[in-house]
Image (cartoon, grey):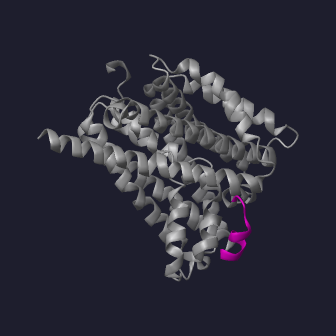
Amino acid sequence: MEEHKISNGQLKALIITANIGVGILSLPSSIADIMNNAGWIAIVLGGLATLPFVYIMNKLAEMYRGRIFYEYGKEVVGNILFKIFNVVYLTYFLVFLAFVVRIFGEVIEAYLLQNTPIEVIILTMLLATSYIGRSDIKSISRMAFLILYIIAISTIIFVILSLPTLDLTNLFPAFKFDIKDIPKGVSTVFFSYVGFEIILIALAYVEDSKSTLKFSFLGIFYTILIYLVTFFITLSQFGIHELKKQIWPSISIMREIELPGFFIENLDGIMMASWVLVVFATMGPLMYASGVVLSNLFNTRKHNFFVLPLVTIVMIIALIPESLTQVYSTMDMIVRYLAIFAIIIAPTILFIVSLLKRRKRV
């Protein structure tokens, strides 16, 4: 346990990189379609809506210091019931992985590797991800910490290069919305923050356990900031009507950036390369978590030998939808329903039961 300790900075980086993956591509257009120019309000509220569950996860880690969620859960609700919980978690991680890698494959095929079969792109990414997924939480956290700098630099470059073509008048009216649209907007954005549930494992390994809640919240706040910047840039660039028509507005902006006389021509390729690393950092923890869940289901000491066989399963799931429309309409919906259990229901049940058991002891 001592060998795999991580810092609070790495915990924060892990949350940010796990959150930001393929969701950032379609979020601006999705939320603009619901709340128009006021989509930024839903982004903020959706991020704040995750904080109670981040708090619950931190409190559970405090109650069962040094143990991961998938270990102490057996004591809280019983071995048989928690095995059902673990099966749902495993299904969630696998479908989520399939969703992410399918979107990744579609984007790469459309913008970079037009002549490469999507099956090859998906398999290559899954094999690369399985390597980090077989590692320990310390290695994954270090990777996230390094990629966080890439995210920060890419965001700054994205903003700077977009500035000459922005029309800030497209941001207005910034407060005009129908209050009935807020619940739908917030629920849509909420699921763009999924991924932070990796802290159900990571919190057990943090060196300074007193500051975990603070850094967990910071991870969410930084994600909110990145989503806001992306929304405002895409809205300023396209305007509300054009933004609604875009599938991946962030990528469309990258492809339109031109710097006359600049010695680098394919700036969109550089930005896409950064995004590939971000997706890698999103998939790595999911692959790792899937192996950990299987390890607890079969009571094994290590998780790494479960990871490679999962590649085939995830690939099969990823290729089931026949079109991109089905990916967003069907697979995305399945991920959302499973996420409700994984992020909201299961941790809340364990938290309440743990509190009741502690009161009885007192």
Q: Quadrant of the N terminus?
A: top left
Instruction: Give the total number of marks visible in the rendering.
Output: 0
Q: Name the dominant secondary structure of the magenta segment.
A: helix
Q: Quadrant of residue 97?
A: top right
Q: Position of residue 99 (x, y in %)?
A: 66, 45
Q: Which residues are magenta?
A: 240-248
- Quarter of the image with the C terminus is top left
Q: Residue 278's spot in the image, x, y percent?
A: 58, 42
Question: Does 180 sit above or below residue 237?
Answer: below
Q: Quadrant of residue 231?
A: bottom right
Is 325 included in the stretch rendered in magenta? no
Left or right position of 21 against 248: left
User: In the image shown, does 313 or 34 lie closer to the viewer?
Assistant: 313
Task: Please say whether residue 261 is visible from this viewpoint.
Answer: no
Answer with left or right where residue 162 lies relative to residue 344: right
Q: Residue at x 37, y 29 (%)?
A: 71
What residue is shown at x 70% (from left), y 76% (from top)?
Answer: 241
Q: Residue at x 50, y 68 (%)?
A: 42
Residue farthest to the right?
115
**Lateral position of residue 74 relative to residue 26, left or right:** left
Give the image location of residue 308, x and y in percent: 63, 22
**In this view, which residue lies farthest toward the left?**
362
For residue 44, say whether it is visible: yes
Return the x and y of residue 63 as percentages of the image width and height: 25, 38
Which of 103 and 263 lies nearest the eye of the viewer?
103
Q: Is residue 262 above or below residue 293?
A: below
Farthest front residue in view = 80
